[in-house]
Image (tube, grey):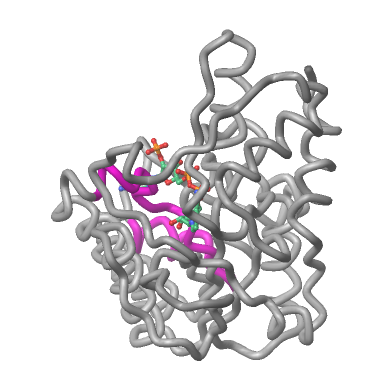
């Protein structure tokens, strides 16, 4: 009998959790075998495994795709959460809901803490905020773990895209006026395990410590992977039109998680560790 059930188990974070948990204690599902929009299938899958904790990682994470199709974003990120949280509550499992920095509007002059007002500025952020509210309503025994700018093994993420572009000789232009908290999926997985084992339910920010711009993150990825000679041009978001409007400054203040003993570390240190593990 599995103790953990992970939705989106083959995504970046889901796979990191599955690697970290003992094989006999983790079950999970992903597309195509389980669509979280299918309430009956979600109830059946979670009911069958009878987990003590459900970690809900599945989401529509393509932020521009969410802007182009907000009703699909809502169906997956809010409707899917309704199904997962409802099934977790029905089967007596606690819930971890993975939230996002994009619930904030990015206009604060400083890092965001858990008590700051939420005000999403794009469809992804709105759908993920709806998911938070639904999760807490249907399963009060929830940890809402907000994170940002995830990267990890096997994922299609910003770090991989930068290194691929550098290796293919494409000119690199990266926005310097969007800041947040780069987070390695391995560190977030460790923090989630810590919350479940040792901290009361509630909202937590868990991300790489400190903050940086997309440009600084790209520069660090190149420098730390032996590509220090590759040039990047800093640009502004106005030079990089997108379907979605990203919030400008959403560095996450993780002091609540740190005070609770979560094993987080500075974003640059984590990025160095990730790149050190990655094959060239
Ligand atoms: N990535 C970030 O920078 C970031 C930042 C802050 C918060 N988060 C949150 O962190 C969590 C994990 O993110 P991640 O980067 O690991 O995402 P990811 O790699 O995109 O993984 C999400 C998984 O969910 C699956 N999925 C999508 N629609 C689904 C559906 N209708 N039913 C079931 N599964 C579905 C995806 O399958 P397909 O690949 O086939 O679509 C994918 O395997 C998400 O809740 C996300 O909102 C992510």
Q: Horizontally, is 34 left or right of 165 in the view?
A: left
Q: Residue at x 54, y 64 (%)?
A: 55
> Magenta residues, as a range?
42-66
Closer to us: 36 or 65: 65
Tell me if residue 45 is in the magenta stretch.
yes
Q: Residue at x 85, y 33 (%)?
A: 276
The part of the image, by quadrant, that contains residue 278 is top right
Residue 1 visible in the shown view: no
Residue 263 lies, with reference to residue 142, above or below; the image says above
Residue 248 in the image, given as x and y percentages of width and height: 42, 61
Residue 160 visible in the shown view: yes
Residue 193 in the image, given as x and y percentages of width and height: 72, 67
Q: Residue at x 84, y 42 (%)?
A: 273
Q: Horizontally, is 64 left or right of 84 in the view?
A: left
Residue 116 in the image, given as x and y percentages of width and height: 47, 87
Closer to us: 242 or 256: 242
Q: Horizontally, is 65 left or right of 218 in the view?
A: left
């Amino acid at each position: 009998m599995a103790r953990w059930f992970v939705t989106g188990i083959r995504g970046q974070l889901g796979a990191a959790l599955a690697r970290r948990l003992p094989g006999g204690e983790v079950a999970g599902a992903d597309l195509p075998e389980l669509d979280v929009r299918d309430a009956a299938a979600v109830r059946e899958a979670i009911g069958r495994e009878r987990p003590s904790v459900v970690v809900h990682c599945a989401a529509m994470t393509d932020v521009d795709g969410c802007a182009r199709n907000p009703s699909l974003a809502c169906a997956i990120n809010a409707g899917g959460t309704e199904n997962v949280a409802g099934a977790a509550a029905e089967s007596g499992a606690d819930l971890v809901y993975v939230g996002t920095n994009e619930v904030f509007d990015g206009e604060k002059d400083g890092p965001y803490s858990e008590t700051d007002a939420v005000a999403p500025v794009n469809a992804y952020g709105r759908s993920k905020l709806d998911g938070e509210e639904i999760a807490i309503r249907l399963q009060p025994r929830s940890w809402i773990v907000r994170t940002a700018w995830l990267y990890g093994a096997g994922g299609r993420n910003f770090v991989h895209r930068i290194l691929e572009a550098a290796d293919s000789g494409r000119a690199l232009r990266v926005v310097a006026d969007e800041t947040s908290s780069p987070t390695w999926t391995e560190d977030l997985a460790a923090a989630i395990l810590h919350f479940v084992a040792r901290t009361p339910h509630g909202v937590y920010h868990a991300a790489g410590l400190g903050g940086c711009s997309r440009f600084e993150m790209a520069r660090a990825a190149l420098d730390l992977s032996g590509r220090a000679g590759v040039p990047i041009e800093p640009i502004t978001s106005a030079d990089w039109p997108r379907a979605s409007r990203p919030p400008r400054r959403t560095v996450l203040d993780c002091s609540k998680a740190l005070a609770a003993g979560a094993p987080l570390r500075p974003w640059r240190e984590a990025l160095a560790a990730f790149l050190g593990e990655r094959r060239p």
